[in-house]
Amino acid sequence: MSINIPIKLLMIDDDPTQLLSLRMRLEGFGFVVTTQSDPRKVIDQLNTTEFDVLLIDLNMPEMSGVDLMKSISNSNYNGKFLSIAISSYNKYDYSTVAEDAGFDGYIDKLDNSRTLSGSLMKIINSILYTK
């Protein structure tokens, strides 16, 4: 599966290895991916670059993905984007945590490339076609 219209993603994760791996996997399907390892820099980045989707790791030591979403909501940033939580931990029901925090969806970042890309497109399409 490859996408026809470039979807600009900002992926936020404290693990550089995960960022590189996910970036390579998603770019292979046609996504335009920018990465950020420091969640404290995201609001500044949003003010200078427009993104269609934010992929946010829920478990970061400096600032959790939930706290980052709250920080974006409380800032004066007024751009539109879809927010998708990602995590590699199956210890908790992170889809519920993501939903409760206001994310538009949740993806397990350990899924294989095709499943990851398919899940991402499914979330994007379901949101775009229901609004």
Image: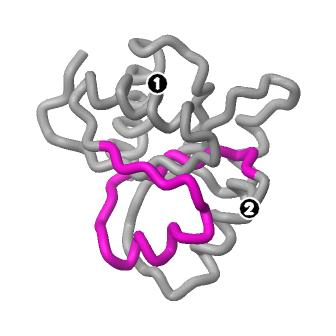
The residue under label 1 is: 119
Tag 2, which secondary structure? loop
Q: On the rendered structure, is 81 left or right of 101? A: left
Q: Specify the amino acid type for callout 1.
A: Ser
Residue at image location 39% in from the left, 20% down from the top:
118
- Of residues 116 and 34, which is closer to you in this image? 34
- What are the residue bounds of the magenta stretch? 33-60
**Within 10 Å of the Cα at label 2, are there few (<14), some (14-19), or many (20+) other Cα atoms?**
some
Say whether residue 30 is magenta: no
Task: Identify the mark nearer the N-term, 2 or 1.
Answer: 2
Quarter location, residue 17: top right
Q: Position of residue 122 (x, y in %)?
A: 41, 28
CB within 8 Å, label 2 to label 1: no
**What is the secondary structure assignment of the residue under circle 1?**
helix
Q: Quadrant of the N terminus?
A: top left
The Cα atoms of the two marked residues, 2 and 1, are separated by 25 Å
Write the residue at 51% across / 67% down.
42
Relative to 100, is 109 on the left or the right?
Answer: left
| Mark number displayed over residue 2 | none
Q: Amino acid at mark 2?
A: Met
Disc number lying in front (2 or 1): 2
**Is 100 above or below relative to 24?**
below
**Residue under pointer 2:** 63
